Image: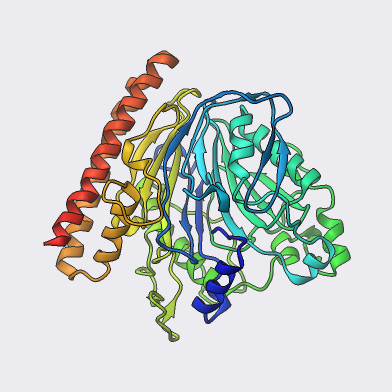
């Protein structure tokens, strides 16, 4: 969930939101490779933007190359600056079209198969902010992928680069992100101006994380599986918010504010989506971050999490300002501007990376389309700039379909949802076959193959949503 620095948008927030429970809205999901049906790392996120739900997104490839000697990156949204290495690696991302308000590259792969997913916004409690406040011109979601992904060859390098930036420049806000490659998948919580913890995510667990911190008691001295800031315990103790359980610091209870209702409802429904047998109650103090399941989790299961509107609970989705005890805030809501799922498969070479499944606008009524991590180009409809409807823009057509589908009849909705399911199932079956083919290619052959496929898939995805837009016009 992203923020803007202008007073205009701050005013809009105040006018739009009667309750503070609506300020943060993104939801992430992560599944260890031992728990997935195909042995792949899977993680993803809904990117929500409450201040401006209709907010254009692109999907583009950034070429590698050389930076000028001494080149400095600057985030125009908050003034953050950072020196850049000489060599810049190729990567793709899903940026905003208003870089003056922040680039917000959000998610992507680089040419070495490193994936980054930023971010699920979070906030520390008031006691922590008095001791280690956020840094106004520190690293924010708006710049995070841009200064990390093009400059690392492994996920661990990505975590270490992030750690160095937070240590030297500070963090502008609380955030949760994932950095992964074929060997490791790291989950990171940035708590305050200079404090964070990154863990190598366990293979046999899954987690659903909306906008608050979730890590509990972990072994902070485990250097193989944990990377942390130096003052993680000291700051909490100085703040008077330090909580220990069984002799270990409880990170969430030490750094997070009270468990908000908006986070409770999304955690609850997301956990039950992946494990209907989970032993949780809605009013639990907090939900255990590391969840288990006695069945393997599929890619389709994760897609369902990002589309969840509390169907698997006794609550109703709090859409369009609806209120009442029966209404709770859902994972999928009218503020989603794109959704993505990373799938890093063991049978794909590192130069291919993995697959990113991308749904433009709200995933409820937009299909997930697959893209290999080594592509050199994306379909033209992903490149359209502008902040108002354009009939040739993948984002704007998908957004228009989402808006109109909300008011469509149940028959129209069910028919379209069936089409989406068939489209995605076909693509998943295709990918399983294509993975075997691309794994046998040279890096150059694989790049060409993946790019041609990306253009084909982009065209098919756009045609799919465009056809539905035309149907809704009749």
Give how far across and how far down residue 167 sits, in percent. 79, 45
Q: In this view, does 258 lie above or below 89?
A: below
Using residue 185 as the reference point, say whether residue 431 is left or right of it.
left
| Colour mode of the rendering | rainbow
Relative depth, front residue between 309 and 285? 309
Count of numbered badges drawn on the protein: 0
The extreme left residue here reads 474
The vertical placement of 385 against 473, above or below, is above
Closer to us: 59 or 305: 59
Residue 114 makes an appearance in the image: yes
Place residue 236 in its image quadrant.
bottom right
Residue at horizontal 73 percent and vertical 69 percent from the top: 125
> Is residue 261 at all visible to an observer of this figure?
no
In this view, the residue in front, 11 or 34, is: 11
- Give the percent coordinates (x, y) of residue 357: 38, 42
The structure residue drawn at horizontal position 88% and vertical position 64%, both measured from the top left corner, is 238
Q: In which quarter of the image is the C terminus?
A: bottom left
Q: In this view, does 276 lie to the left or right of 14?
A: left
Residue at the image point whose x is 59% and y is 73% from the top: 260
Position of residue 459 measured from the top left corner of the image (x, y, whole percent): 26, 37
Left or right of 350? Residue 312 is left
Q: Quadrant of residue 259?
A: bottom right
Q: Where is residue 126 in the image (x, y as percent from the top left)?
A: 76, 71
């Amino acid at each position: 969930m992203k923020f803007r620095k202008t007073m205009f948008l701050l005013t809009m927030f105040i006018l739009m939101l009667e309750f503070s429970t609506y300020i943060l809205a993104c939801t992430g999901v992560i599944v260890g490779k031992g728990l997935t049906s195909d042995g792949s790392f899977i993680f993803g996120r809904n990117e929500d933007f409450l201040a401006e739900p209709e907010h254009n997104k692109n999907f583009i490839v950034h070429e590698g190359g050389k930076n000028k000697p001494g080149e400095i990156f600057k985030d125009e949204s908050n003034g953050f600056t950072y020196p850049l290495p000489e060599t810049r690696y190729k990567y793709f991302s899903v940026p905003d079209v208003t870089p003056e308000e922040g680039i917000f590259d959000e998610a992507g792969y680089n040419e070495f198969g490193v994936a980054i997913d930023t971010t699920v916004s979070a906030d520390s409690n008031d006691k922590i902010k008095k001791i280690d406040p956020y840094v106004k011109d520190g690293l924010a979601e708006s710049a995070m992928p841009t200064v990390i992904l093009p400059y690392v060859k492994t996920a661990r390098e990505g975590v270490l680069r992030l750690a160095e930036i937070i240590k030297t420049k500070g963090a502008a806000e609380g955030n949760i992100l994932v950095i992964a490659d074929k060997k490791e998948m790291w989950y990171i919580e940035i708590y305050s101006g200079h404090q964070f913890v990154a863990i190598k995510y366990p293979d046999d667990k899954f987690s659903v994380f909306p906008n608050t911190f979730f890590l509990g008691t972990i072994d902070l001295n485990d250097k193989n599986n944990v990377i942390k800031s130096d003052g993680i315990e000291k700051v909490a103790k100085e703040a008077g918010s330090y909580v220990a359980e069984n002799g270990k610091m409880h990170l969430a209870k030490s750094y997070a504010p009270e468990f908000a209702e908006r986070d409770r409802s999304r955690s609850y429904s997301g956990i039950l989506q992946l494990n209907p047998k989970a032993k949780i109650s809605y009013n639990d103090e907090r939900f255990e971050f590391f969840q288990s399941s006695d069945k393997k989790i599929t890619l389709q299961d994760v897609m369902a999490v990002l589309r969840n509107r509390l169907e698997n609970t006794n609550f109703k989705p709090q859409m369009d300002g609806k209120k009442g005890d029966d209404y709770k805030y859902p994972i999928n809501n009218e503020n989603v501007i794109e959704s993505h799922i990373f799938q890093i498969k063991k049978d794909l070479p590192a130069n291919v990376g993995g697959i990113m499944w991308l749904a433009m606008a709200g995933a409820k009524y937009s299909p997930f389309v697959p893209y290999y991590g080594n592509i050199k180009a994306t379909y033209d409809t992903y490149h359209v700039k502008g902040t108002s409807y354009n009939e040739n823009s993948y984002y704007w057509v998908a957004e228009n379909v989402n808006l109109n589908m909300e008011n469509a009849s149940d028959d129209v909705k069910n028919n379209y949802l069936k089409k989406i399911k068939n489209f995605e199932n076909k693509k998943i079956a295709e990918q399983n076959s294509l993975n075997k083919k691309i794994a046998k290619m040279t890096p150059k052959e694989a790049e060409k193959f993946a790019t041609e496929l990306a253009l084909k898939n982009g065209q098919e995805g756009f045609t799919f949503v465009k056809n539905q837009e035309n149907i809704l016009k009749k």
